[in-house]
Amino acid sequence: MYVKELELKNFRNYESLDLEFDPRINLITGRNAQGKTNLIEAVYLISMGRSFRAGRDSEMIRFGQNEALVRAEAVKAVMDTRIDISISRKSKKYIKKDGKQLHKTSELLNNIFIVAFTPEDLRIVKDEPEKRRRFIDKELAQIQPAYYLCLSRYKKVLQQRNSCLKETPVRPSMLSLWDMQLVQYGADMMRMRKAFIDRLSVFSGKIHDSITNGQEKLDIQYESNVPYEEDASRRQERLIETLEKSRDTDIKMKTTTRGPHKDDLRFLVNGVNARKYGSQGQQRTCALSLKLAELDFIRQETGETAILLLDDVMSELDQSRRSYLIDSLEENQIFITMTEAEEDLIQAYGHPTVFSVQDGHVTLL
């Protein structure tokens, strides 16, 4: 799978742009604040229907304009596809796939598979649990739309339950109603998360072993906020028991303090908790192994090779990690942003396609 062509109109700092990409390596160079990340943000948008940056959709519209347009053609193993996304300050996103309008952003998922790796991702091991949960949700939703639907419903019920907890007095009957729905969706989320992390741990363990020349063993574990049960009925029972036990605390705090929305990941390097005791180098290697494992997971799950976006991370990696990225990814289309095209990368990748970005204008070098 690869993105063949991308067209932008009034997207971020691009007034008008039409590019064809290399099926393998695309180096996007330029000084800071010229539009490098904006370019790969548009590539990410056609996969997920949203940006990998925080913020509102309207922020992707060029200053002084009311609408932005992103069009892309992607080559796939089975059938090529075309995506059109229109963003307006006055209305919702308008998305078309192969000329047919999609009514929900979730309908775009499981179509073009993209893994984005940013400097922020290098800190995923040591940062707060929310970022690790966001990683699970974002990556799993891309591949399994059923998870996206379950997650969306869970979040809506959680919001209703928290609103109920803020009432004075709290109505126990309403709280019990939301509890039952939260248990239903929460138990399914836990099952899908556990299965995902177990498989990802296998892939990342092999990658980590290669990067460290067999000196370190990586194990990634799903750290459920509620004791995990393989049996579906027992899992629901555990979750409802947890909610009931924490009810007094929830009422006092006016929020739901236990549940899958408090899940986390544990990274063990040679059996030692990498978040607490790992060096910065070990934590970064864990992060790299985790992100690259997504590529293997997507290939096994879908039969497609995902597209890898490396946004200004090469300068953050030492030579061994850079070498692994160069030597191991032979089938994936890769976009790399950097301030200037480094000679060792050009030689290692066999004269890749190099673009220069300056103030929203792109030149092929």
Image (cartoon, helix red, strand yellow):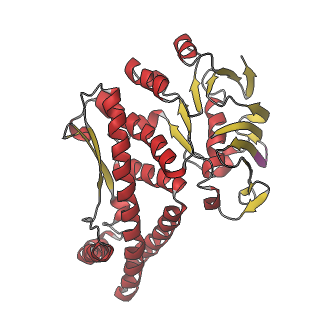
Residue 181, visible in the rendered structure: yes
Q: Is residue 321 above or below residue 50?
A: above
**Is residue 67 found inside the magenta-colored segment of the image?**
yes
The picture places residue 167, in percent across and down from the top left corner, at 41, 79
Residue that appears at 57% across and 45% down: 304
| Quarter the N terminus occupies | top right
Residue 73 sits above or below residue 235 on the image: above
Q: Between residues 175 and 323, which one lies in front from this camera angle?
A: 323
Picture coordinates of residue 238 (x, y %)?
A: 26, 73
- Look at 77% across and 46% down and name the residue there: 69
Give the magenta range.
Answer: 65-69
Relative height, residue 215 to residue 343 (above, below): below
Left or right: 17 as drawn, with respect to 223? right
Q: Main secondary structure of the magenta part?
A: strand
Tell me the quarter of the image containing the C terminus: top right
The location of residue 24, given as percent across then percent down, is 62, 29
